[in-house]
Image (spheres, coloured by chain):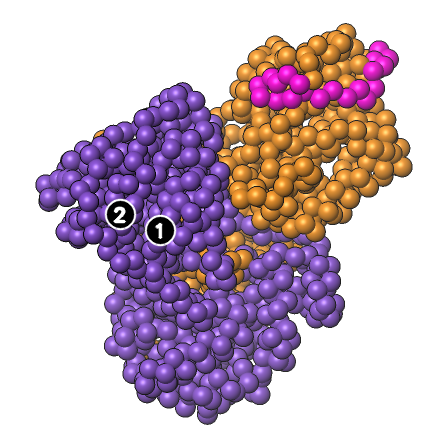
Chain colours: A orange, B purple
Amino acid sequence: MPQLRLALAQVNARVGDLEHNADLVVDQCKQAAEQGAHLIVFPEMVLTGYPLEDLAFRSSIIKASKAAAADLAKRLADEGCGDLVAVVGFLDDAEDVKEAVGIPKNAPQNAVAVMHGGEIVAKQAKHHLWNYGVGDEIRTFVPGDTINIVQVRGIDVALAICEDLWRDGPSAAAKAADAALLVVPNGSPYEADKDDVRLDLCVRRARKGECALAYVNLVGGQDELVFDGDSIVVGADGTLLGRTEQFEPELLVVDLDLPAATPAMPDEDERFGGLKIKRTIVTDEPAESYEPRPVEIRERMDRNREIYTAIVVGLRDYVEKNGFRSVLFGASGGIDSTLVGAIAVDALGPDRVFGVSNPSSWSTEHSKTDAAELAERTGFSLDTVPIAPIFDAYQEALHLEDVAEENLQARIRAVIWMGLSNKDGHLVLACGNKSELATGYSTIYGDAVGGYAPIKDVPKTLVWELSRWRNAWAEEHGETPPIPENAISKPPSAELRPGQVDSDSLPPYDLLDAILDAYVERDLGSADVIAEGFDPEVVQQVITLVDRAEYKRRQYPPGPKVSRRNFGRDRRVPITNLWREHL
Amino acid sequence: MPQLRLALAQVNARVGDLEHNADLVVDQCKQAAEQGAHLIVFPEMVLTGYPLEDLAFRSSIIKASKAAAADLAKRLADEGCGDLVAVVGFLDDAEDVKEAVGIPKNAPQNAVAVMHGGEIVAKQAKHHLWNYGVGDEIRTFVPGDTINIVQVRGIDVALAICEDLWRDGPSAAAKAADAALLVVPNGSPYEADKDDVRLDLCVRRARKGECALAYVNLVGGQDELVFDGDSIVVGADGTLLGRTEQFEPELLVVDLDLPAATPAMPDEDERFGGLKIKRTIVTDEPAESYEPRPVEIRERMDRNREIYTAIVVGLRDYVEKNGFRSVLFGASGGIDSTLVGAIAVDALGPDRVFGVSNPSSWSTEHSKTDAAELAERTGFSLDTVPIAPIFDAYQEALHLEDVAEENLQARIRAVIWMGLSNKDGHLVLACGNKSELATGYSTIYGDAVGGYAPIKDVPKTLVWELSRWRNAWAEEHGETPPIPENAISKPPSAELRPGQVDSDSLPPYDLLDAILDAYVERDLGSADVIAEGFDPEVVQQVITLVDRAEYKRRQYPPGPKVSRRNFGRDRRVPITNLWREHL
């Protein structure tokens, strides 16, 4: 059987930075060519970055992307990689589609270009647009209906893009076309607790298509998404042949023995799995026989390390890609800001992290000492700005009481952070966890202020678990555990009035988090949550908190968004939502 | 020809409030029955409210909506409206659809029920899901593929839902099925400067379908959308036969002479315009001959009145549907907050509007007197809280300068407003206009703070125009013009440093607004904007301001959103977007 040396380029692209992304592609192609690879596959839309969302509508970026793809093909040949066949994702447009109701403006397409010898020798647009969860592609892209079979070194290689793999089309078409390998560029974000669905999917599709399968994913943070890489190669029988590290850029090179291309059988006009087959012969000469290299199959991380790493990578790339030099956070001594401090130092190093302690008249002594101990253990700079004189100046005029008075303290702190951010250019981090955000145990324009919220998706019970895990990891590796023990063990408190503890207002966190999982993550109605065995009164309490908090969050946006349509709005869940179960 | 008395119920539904919406339907049906109507048509999803967005996924609301629709059919008969045929929009589900990748959870459908004699006699789901602009329905609904032909009083009536009308299917099917009338429930939000596209569309489709057409729209504000009603009836030849008032609930009754139903011709399995035809005979006996009533065709408003009314209705319904009693705004004496004050009083009356003046050490005298004059002219309560002592307390600790010092003043004001909001329950209004929001001439967590921003879509030049229009309208109607002349004529200033005026930082507003229109509204790239004849330097200045502002707004969300997926995010345009033309 002919041999194929296949390279998977798991890279960290930047949305909109075509120049940087093109350099990245050239660099990876050079490395792959040096290692003797015949074919290199990049992740989805690597040239423009992913996801593009509304940017895709602008004719200027479509033009720029098409030009950049053509230039890149030439540049690869100029730099000595012309023999290497490269599959490069980019933003294309559907030239034959006319403007009409329901067609995305300027007909953008999520496409791949096959580059060889200085030219783009084949192009293909994504068939199945990802439009659930965080995907929103039907709004932005025109789907394609063609599957390419590209012959490389005498081997037929079929192409599919990300979501396509989740449908039956591509493997049915690959099988019908007798392809030996299906390559799949992806932009697939990290999700916790997904089990090994990607490997399972690759195995299933490889078997169904009766071909080997290469799955190549992006890596790195892009806004609130984190791509975890985890690129995979499986044989036609489903055997795992190669797998990359999670969350790290990597160039994986795998040697495959694959069946030689057979003469094209299906009629050009016939469709398989709804797709038209288009054949391109790039190189029909098989590679000279060579010694294959050993297989690299990286181990996957355990759950806590995986989640912690996702958060660190997400924060680091958010800071880097936004061009911030440093971050600032309110170091209250509580476990949430303590974990955020440890994450920030892991992401950026202690010199780029600044903590501010803002004690009030009724802050406890341990809140100050715990914050100081965290700073000492991790090495970031801690500043102190007491809020009492400012609080008194407001109260002289306003005489606020109860919750209004509690919120005032949180908001004074936020104004201080934003002042320091304006002065020194820090990105402010919001330290809220998912349990308190979901239940509204948080002050709008107060502790909710910040440009990035590292643990907004982490329930409180997981905050403690990750803190313990981080300390244990440090001990295992002979380092100082970053998190002060007292921050983990003391009862949680907002310290907005004397003696206040979270359990005054909320159910115990293990119970709260379990109900939140049912109601928020799994979308169950109250009757179904109660049917899982929870106390109906507590369920009612939690659901009421969640619905009111959601309501409030939507009532108080950050500042109005500038819509592209007069008096229109961008997509959000209804604010004045009077669904009875919820309020 | 048989006669049909058709009622169009242009109503203000509330998202999620099934009980209120059912009462509304019953009330309208009773009125229509009293007036002798044979058929009544309600807007899209009237029973659940529209748009439902993510709420549609919850099995609990799907169940509740289906039960409410069945109950409503019975209740209509019980209350003496059993003879009237009612077309009522609701949330249904596609029972035969299995869970799969890409199918919305629980298979919700945007549907109508035809109610008669205590029963639901026909159901139909929307064929073409609205997924551009502010529509996002492919995410939430499963499309239908059936068009109902319902015989009412011996007349064949075809059904289509909103976006369906923008495609060719329904009129082709209506024509093939020989329908005499096509009825179309809509949830179509107001857009400025759209010309009369709705009437044009109705005329075109009626002619194509060779049938009369009734277009029924929602009215009222729902979150950031405003539905303007403007329901329409046209004859098969395109003659306008009836039209409702804009922005007001109305029950329009129109008498039609329509061709009698012909025996069903097309085969049940044949498709027309992609749709299966399903026939239901509700009543085959023609109505007894009667004297038709005169036609009501309301005039459309002129542009300024239309926009001003849209803003007033949007604010009023946001306040009412959210259960607020009152609003509070920072009355600076500038034209933006002055117009907001006038709008708020028009929406809610002076007793529900509260202004706060927060002068700093360098506020001008006229800023205080203009705010006081507005309060006097419109009758709302104006309070004054000077910010100097609070400012000094912050500066004692922070020593901020330049922009950081300017922002501090805006943020102190916002903390005061939110404190008063927490104390007295007011909804805080943000007074920013579109020109300053688009260019970032605004402080995040400062003047951008608020739960609702009435003029966020109004460019500065239009702010002045609407102010002059409102005063002229008052004079025409013998009322006191609400807006102090000096607020209109003085040069705009943020008053965050001595002698500051907007023109220090921004191009003249007429030029700025024209460039914003090209770049933001029409999505042109910089080369295309320059090609329209603008000075390249000014274009570059404006585009840089807009892109940086967009960037910053996204960096500083209000507080993290609680996502339904771990480490995922909800749909937003990329934040760390490095597209070169933009930054």
In depth, the one of A511 and B346 nearer the eye is: B346
Q: Position of residue B447 (x, y in %)?
A: 46, 71
Depth check: B249 or B135 in front? B249
Q: Nearer the viewer, residue A209 or B533?
A: B533
Q: Which residue is mark 2?
A: B6
B309 with respect to B167 (left or right): left
Q: Position of residue B255 (x, y in %)?
A: 27, 50
Q: Is residue B237 or residue A29 the one in the foreground? A: B237
Check disc 1 and report the residue beneath it: B233
The amino acid pointed to by label 1 is Val
In the picture, the quarter occupied by the C terminus of chain B is bottom right
For disc 2, the chain is B
Amino acid type, mark 2? Leu
Co-location on one chain, circles 1 and 2: yes
Q: Looking at the image, do the residues carrying marks 1 and 2 touch, with CB atoms under 8 Å apart?
A: yes
Q: Quadrant of residue B82?
A: top left
Instruction: Indicate the chain on which mark 1 is placed.
Output: B
Residue ID at (59%, 67%): B439
Range of magenta residues? A269-290
